[in-house]
Amino acid sequence: MTMEDHIRAILEEIDPHSDQMDKTPGRVSAFCKDFFSGYGTDPNHIAGAFYDSEMNDLIILKDIAFESVCEHHLAPIIGTASVGYVPNGKIIIGASKLARIVDCFAHRLQLQERMTIGIGRAVDSILQAKGVGVYVEAEHFCISNRGVKKRGARFVTRYFSGVLQGSLRQEFLATVLSR
Ligand SMILES: [Zn+2]
């Protein structure tokens, strides 16, 4: 059975009498293939520029908006990720590449904890940076709209490596959390 057939079967369970959804399985199937493009992307080989730079202080791209889907309920996760690193004094990457790394993970079925670690490790391995920090804050529809139904509650996960595990952690967080 194709993905389309499976979606048709699910829709027939939900609404056996609808005659308005003939094209829905095809649309949902196309949407899924498009949205879950993260599986076809290797975070270590994401397009984007590298630049030579002696920069050796914290670089942060904050509030990168993302949308994902939780692997437990297939419910939306909507949030922001902030990604920072201290370069090794030789190489930096274009800021858009940090956003693409976030998208690569967001466009997979996710656990926010795994996504946070995945982003951090990808930046670590691409840049061989002195340290990496990731801060993810997101609303999970499986918490806000089902079960305990706590609308507005936001889930926070963090990743720190290298020098970001030490004194720079507070500087990173202060920058990320300042409005
Ligand atoms: Zn969930």
Image (cartoon, grey):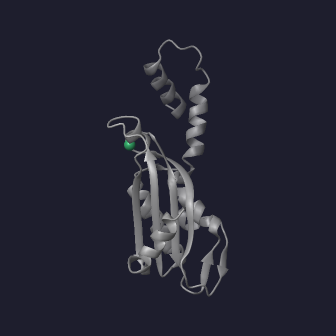
Residue 141: percent from the left, percent from the top? 43, 40
**Residue 73 position within the rendered picture, expressed as x and y whole percent measured from the top left:** 39, 39
Residue pictured at 57% horizontal, 50% vertical: 37
The one of 130 and 41 positioned closer to us in this rendering = 130
Q: Is residue 64 above or below residue 37?
A: below
Q: Could you say where residue 50 lies in the image, as x and y percent from the top left?
A: 65, 75
Q: Is residue 49 left or right of residue 109?
A: right
Identify the residue at the far front of this view: 179
Residue visible at 43% across and 61% down in the picture: 116
Q: Nearer the viewer, residue 165 or 99?
A: 165
Looking at the image, residue 91 lies above or below residue 27: below
Residue 130 in percent (x, y) is at 48, 82
Judged from this view, the residue extending furthest toward the left is 148
Inspect this view and state whether residue 75 appears: yes
**For residue 13, above or below residue 39:** above
Q: Which picture quadrant has residue 26? A: top right
